[in-house]
Image (cartoon, helix red, strand yellow):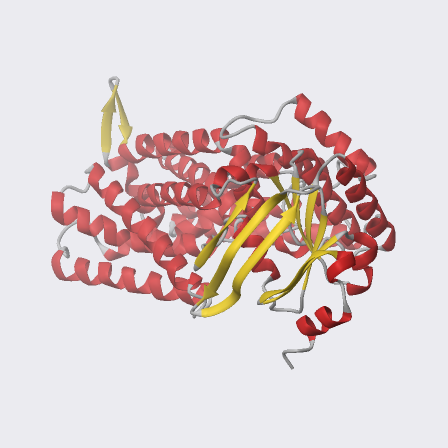
């Protein structure tokens, strides 16, 4: 738990000449549970997108496992916000979880029985087995988040990038997701999670990045999670 | 007469198969734009070849189709205007240039605005080609090849189409470029639309592309089912609409579009009724 697995080096991203983030320098430690917090418009999503190479930085760069190319992205399992996809899409829960296996197939090859088996196992971990044949539009918010995490587990990557996974879900699912994350951490997985609820940061995470256009503070929760830093990110602007 | 229906059926299958993914990606209106702007590609290619059967027409149409998609994306990605406004401006600009060119320089040839807009499937059997000793309508052969290409594309890229339609960001991180798949899809849409031009015209081809898929979307739990249902509905709409138009002596593509709308409304109402009478699931 010492070397950094995601590296952000002097990253600036601007949209229409307005900077969304400025000169970010971030190291995400391998095997950490790292939260990204900050007010609306602080650039949390921009940071995630830059790491996934979905947007071109204005300057600076990001690397995953010391690799700045797109190839390294195969090590990332992405868990989007619930609202980012069309839940009326004609697919069952199992269909969506099997998508987690696509990364291992490459172009044109179809998933096989082994992929289905791995997907079913991931559903079991998220306690969603009985819903496997449900159409995804029939799921509750918490169940949708479980499906997304199951898909990421089926992906079997070393890094999980999650965009507000605990937003608008029930308390049982929240506990299940946190327990699952801690279990996966024991297997050596790294988590970078955009998080909204400041009260639960010390309980759920061991590292935190406090962001507001620039990095206000970044490091172990014990060291940087202070009222001064939080105020600097959330109230200084006003 | 059989040949007219065969052309109509093949057109319906070729267009609606791609329509599944256009509906899922929310690109119905982009398709409408393409089905009009490709006229510019046809006109420009026609000026070069002076032959309405030249394959160059398809290439010209495809290039303009892709240019349409690119310009729409370029303008809407600037975040200065919304996506629908961007479609509106690109669509009308390119189409207007084509209309001006046709009316100014090609008024006396087959590139007639009425036929381009409305199509005329009844003329399809007049234009024939000999294949292995059989005399077949040119449109039938042409459309069958396009249908085959579309089927191969969907079978080959089923997984890629599925994941990029459902969750483009996840797809990109998994190594499947949603943009690449989208441009291949839109190339095929352009090629299919230009081929369907003569039969159904550029105004109503949008109904052929999207109506069956939208109807199937209402009642499909899985993608594979949606594809089958789309093809069945497309076949029904085209034959039922074709028969109605043929025997009432009205526009055939107009009849198919009308039947497609009725089918959609019926399925929509049945679905609403069943959903409101079903017990909620937990």
Quick one: which residue is furthest to the right in this view? A172
User: Within the image, what quadrant is residue B29 found in?
Assistant: bottom left
Q: Position of residue B220 (x, y in %)?
A: 65, 42
Name the residue: 67% across, 71% down.
A233
Residue B176 lies left or right of residue A116; in this view the side is left
Residue B222 lies left or right of residue A110; in this view the side is right
Quick one: which residue is furthest to the top in this view? B132
Q: Position of residue A32 (x, y in %)?
A: 72, 46
User: Within the image, what quadrant is residue B143 found in?
Assistant: top left
Q: Position of residue B181 (x, y in %)?
A: 45, 41
What count of labels does the image hold? 0
Residue B43 lies left or right of residue A122; in this view the side is left
Looking at the image, which is closer to me, B260 or B2? B260
Can you say whether A209 is above or below B129 in the image?
below
Can you say whether A229 is above or below B146 in the image?
below
Quarter that holds the N terminus of chain B: top left
Q: Position of residue B200 (x, y in %)?
A: 36, 47
Name the residue: 57% across, 67% down.
A213
Name the residue: 23% across, 62% down.
B97
Residue A168 seen in this snapshot: no
């Amino acid at each position: 738990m010492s070397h950094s697995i995601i590296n952000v080096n002097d990253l600036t991203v601007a949209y229409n000449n307005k900077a969304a983030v400025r000169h970010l320098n971030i190291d995400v430690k391998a095997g950490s549970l790292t939260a990204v917090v900050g007010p609306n418009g602080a650039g949390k999503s921009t940071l995630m997108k830059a790491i996934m190479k979905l947007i071109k930085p204005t300057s600076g760069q990001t690397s995953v496992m010391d690799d700045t190319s797109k190839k390294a992205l195969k090590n990332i399992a992405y868990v989007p916000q619930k609202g980012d996809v069309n839940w009326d899409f004609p697919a069952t829960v199992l269909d969506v979880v099997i998508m987690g296996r696509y990364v291992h197939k490459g172009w044109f090859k179809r998933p096989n029985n082994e992929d289905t088996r791995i997907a079913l196992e991931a559903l079991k971990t998220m306690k969603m087995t009985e819903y496997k044949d449900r159409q995804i539009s029939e799921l509750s918010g918490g169940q949708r988040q479980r499906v997304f995490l199951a898909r990421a587990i089926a992906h079997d990557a070393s890094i999980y990038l999650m965009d507000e996974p605990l937003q608008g879900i029930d308390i049982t699912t929240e506990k299940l997701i946190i327990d699952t994350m801690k279990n996966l951490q024991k297997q050596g997985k790294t988590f970078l999670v955009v998080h909204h609820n400041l009260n639960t940061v010390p309980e759920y995470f061991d590292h935190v990045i406090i962001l507001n256009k620039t990095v206000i503070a970044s490091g172990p929760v014990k060291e940087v999670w202070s009222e001064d830093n939080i105020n600097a990110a959330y109230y200084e602007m006003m | 007469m059989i040949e007219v229906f065969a052309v109509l059926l093949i057109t319906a299958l070729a267009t609606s198969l791609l329509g599944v993914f256009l509906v899922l990606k929310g690109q119905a209106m982009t398709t409408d734009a393409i089905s009009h702007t490709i006229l510019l590609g046809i006109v420009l290619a026609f000026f070069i070849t002076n032959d309405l059967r030249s394959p160059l027409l398809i290439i010209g149409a495809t290039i303009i189709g892709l240019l349409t998609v690119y310009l729409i994306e370029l303008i809407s990605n600037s975040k200065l205007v919304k996506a629908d406004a961007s479609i509106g401006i690109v669509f009308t600009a390119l189409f207007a240039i084509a209309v001006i060119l046709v009316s100014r320089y090609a008024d006396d040839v087959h590139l007639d605005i009425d036929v381009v807009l409305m199509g005329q499937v009844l003329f399809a059997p007049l234009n024939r080609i000999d294949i292995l000793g059989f005399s077949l309508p040119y449109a039938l052969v042409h459309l069958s090849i396009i249908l085959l290409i579309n089927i191969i594309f969907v079978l080959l890229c089923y997984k890629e189409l599925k994941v990029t339609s459902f969750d483009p960001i996840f797809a990109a991180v998994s190594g499947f470029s949603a943009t690449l798949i989208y441009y291949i899809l839109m190339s095929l849409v352009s090629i299919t639309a230009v081929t369907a031009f003569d039969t159904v015209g550029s105004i109503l081809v949008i109904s052929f592309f999207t109506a069956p898929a939208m109807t199937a979307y209402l009642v499909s739990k899985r993608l594979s089912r949606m594809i089958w249902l789309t093809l069945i509905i497309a076949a029904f709409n085209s034959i039922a609409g074709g028969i109605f138009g043929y025997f009432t002596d009205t526009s055939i593509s107009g009849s198919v579009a009308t039947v497609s709308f009725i089918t959609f409304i019926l399925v929509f109402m049945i679905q609403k009724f069943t959903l409101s009478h079903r017990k909620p699931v937990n």
